[in-house]
Amino acid sequence: MDDAVAPIPVLNDNPYEAPRSAIRPRNGVDMPTEVLAGRGARLAAVLIDYLCMVAVSIPGFAGFLYIEMPGADTAGGELVTLAFVMGLGVLSVVQGIYIVRDGQTLGKKMMKIRIVDHVDGSIPRWPRILGMRYVLNMALRQIPFYFLVDAVLIFGEEQRCIHDHLAGTKVIEVIEA
């Protein structure tokens, strides 16, 4: 019987655990497995995200410079600064929606990579992905050399940085069918 599936070994004797079974490939063809995102794609995604942030920040910097000019009308500089704050707010909301809904920032969308749960491959829930992966990681960047250690860990076998370990996530390629 070629279609027989070998039983999965029992890891514990929990009588309340849901039953498990092996997934049988369709038509004898193995289903695609997750592929970790390449380091270059992850770097490019981060650079794209930073470029988006710089693009919306330029009006704010211009506004600050304009206000500091001798004889400048401060109302014009305040409008430009307001545009900067609004642009940064809109970018944060857009990035937040994409991260929570798809596990992707704008850069990750462009590079066709996604943040997923390290164990089951699902999109992590928003408190974990935003809180642990982004907010806690930003707070930890106040520690000297933290950012360097965080970045260097991507060269490990699992290709997971500190922020990936904190949030229990990994970054994979998006496989289009």
Image (cartoon, helix red, strand yellow):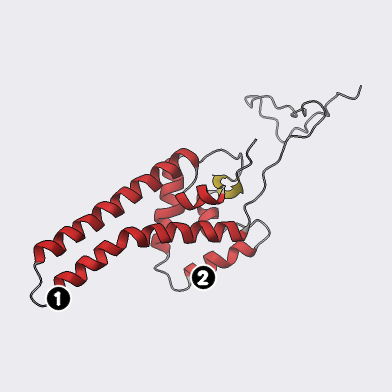
Q: Under tag 2, what secondary structure?
A: helix
For the point 10% across and 66% down, which residue is it?
Answer: 74
Q: Which mark is residue 69?
A: 1
Relative vertical location of residue 100 with respect to residue 42 in this rendering, above or below: above
Amino acid type at circle 1 is Met
Q: Which residue is mark 2?
A: 148
Q: Which mark is residue 162?
A: none
Q: Is residue 159 left or right of residue 131?
A: right
For the point 60% across and 40% down, which residue is it?
Answer: 121
Relative vertical location of residue 74 with respect to residue 68 in this rendering, above or below: above
Q: Position of residue 2 (x, y in %)?
A: 90, 25
In the picture as drawn, the residue positioned furthest to the right comes out as 1
Count how many numbered circles sit on residues in the image.
2
Q: Is residue 99 left or right of residue 54?
A: right
Give whichever of discs 1 and 2 has the lower sequence position.
1
Relative vertical location of residue 48 with respect to residue 26 in this rendering, above or below: below
Q: Is residue 107 left or right of residue 63?
A: right
For the point 42% across and 66% down, which residue is it?
Answer: 141
Q: Quadrant of residue 83?
A: bottom left
Q: Residues within 10 Å of mark 1 (few under 14, many from 20)?
A: few
Of 166 and 31, nearer the camera is 31
For the point 9% across and 62% down, which residue is it?
Answer: 75
Of 153 and 48, nearer the camera is 48
Of 169 and 112, nearer the camera is 112
Q: How far, Cα to Cα, is label 1 from label 2? A: 38 Å
Q: Position of residue 61 (x, y in %)?
A: 26, 67
Amino acid type at circle 2 is Leu
Q: Quadrant of the N terminus?
A: top right
| Front tag of 1 and 2 | 1
